Image (cartoon, rainbow, N blue to C red):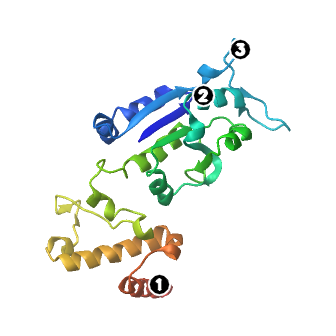
């Protein structure tokens, strides 16, 4: 996969691509990336990229011309274009899975009050928000999207490591423990030390349901649950009511 990011601050993003799992994916040739500073496509002596919005309002808006030229320079009209935006739809694991199937992604890291709407329309861009809050710039959001996508590509991470993660089957992950067995008077649950695989699997299913009920009950509406898991969920709901 090739990832191109249009940004005003490439120096913020560069360390991410030279670190950890991403660095190894690049070295293996699985990921290719390019950082484009769209200020380089601005005109005038000050390389201006923003202006006041029509109709008034606080803040500045990214102008269409520099972004259009930058997007055109990377052939964006033939590629999937994403814009990070607080007014975009909420980004999800399902979006990550869908984007991971693309050969190329072009991401515009939004800034200020956003970008000229005509860029969205000209490039059929998909706008995503990574949460119900506002950031000062889109670089952090871009990294979140990229990180969620590239790890799903074959040979980046072992498939077994992806199978029981949070949001798989619309359930959150179970609690996990490692050595030592006791730390600060807190012990690893006995079932995890038992070596009994069926009991461990059942405990993990129970904890996935509990964590989801506690932290993200909204996910349960679309969760893919076995008959046994549904029975467990009904019992949990009953206990919660008690």
Q: Residue at x 40, y 75 (%)?
A: 209
Let me know if residue 137 appears in the view. no
3 left or right of 163 in image: right
69 left or right of 211 in image: right
- Alpha carbon separation for disc pair 3 and 2: 16 Å
Mark identifier at residue 171: none
Let me know if residue 205 appears in the view. yes
Mark identifier at residue 44: 3
Position of 18 relative to 149 (above/below): above
- Alpha carbon separation for disc pair 2 and 1: 53 Å
Question: Which is more N-terminal, label 1 or label 2?
Answer: 2
Residue labelled with disc 1: 237
- Alpha carbon separation for disc pair 1 and 3: 63 Å
Position of 205 relative to 45 (above/below): below
Q: Secondary structure at mark 3?
A: loop
Residue labelled with disc 2: 70
Question: Which is more N-terminal, label 2 or label 3?
Answer: 3
Q: Secondary structure at mark 2?
A: helix
Question: Residue 219, position in %: x, y?
Answer: 50, 70
Q: Nearer the viewer, residue 198 or 65?
A: 65
Position of 133 relative to 177 (above/below): above
Q: Residue at x 81, y 38 (%)?
A: 57
Cβ atoms under marks 3 and 2 closer than 8 Å: no
Packing grade of label 3 (10 A; few <14, some 14-19, many >=20) is few
Packing grade of label 2 (10 A; few <14, some 14-19, many >=20) is many
Position of 196 relative to 98 (above/below): below
């Amino acid at each position: 996969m090739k990832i191109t990011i249009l940004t005003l601050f490439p120096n913020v993003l560069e360390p991410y691509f030279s670190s950890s799992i991403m660095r190894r994916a690049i070295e293996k040739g699985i990921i290719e990336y390019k950082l484009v500073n769209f200020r380089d496509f601005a005109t005038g002596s000050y390389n201006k990229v923003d202006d006041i919005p029509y109709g008034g309002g606080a803040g500045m808006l990214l102008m269409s011309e520099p972004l259009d030229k930058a997007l055109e320079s990377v052939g964006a009209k033939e590629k999937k274009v994403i814009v990070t935006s607080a007014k975009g739809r909420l980004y999800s694991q399902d979006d990550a899975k869908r984007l991971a199937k693309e050969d190329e992604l072009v991401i515009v890291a939004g800034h200020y009050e956003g970008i000229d709407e005509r860029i969205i329309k000209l490039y059929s861009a998909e706008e995503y928000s990574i949460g119900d809050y506002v950031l000062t710039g889109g670089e952090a959001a871009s990294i979140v999207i990229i990180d969620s996508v590239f790890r799903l590509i074959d040979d980046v991470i072992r498939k077994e490591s992806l199978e029981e993660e949070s949001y798989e089957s619309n359930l959150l992950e179970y609690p996990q423990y490692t050595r030592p067995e006791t730390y600060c008077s807190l012990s690893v649950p006995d079932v995890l030390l038992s070596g009994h695989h069926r009991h461990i699997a059942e405990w993990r299913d129970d904890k996935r349901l509990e964590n989801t009920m506690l932290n993200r009950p909204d996910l349960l509406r679309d969760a893919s649950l076995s008959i046994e898991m549904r029975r467990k969920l009904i019992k949990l709901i009953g206990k919660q009511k008690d």
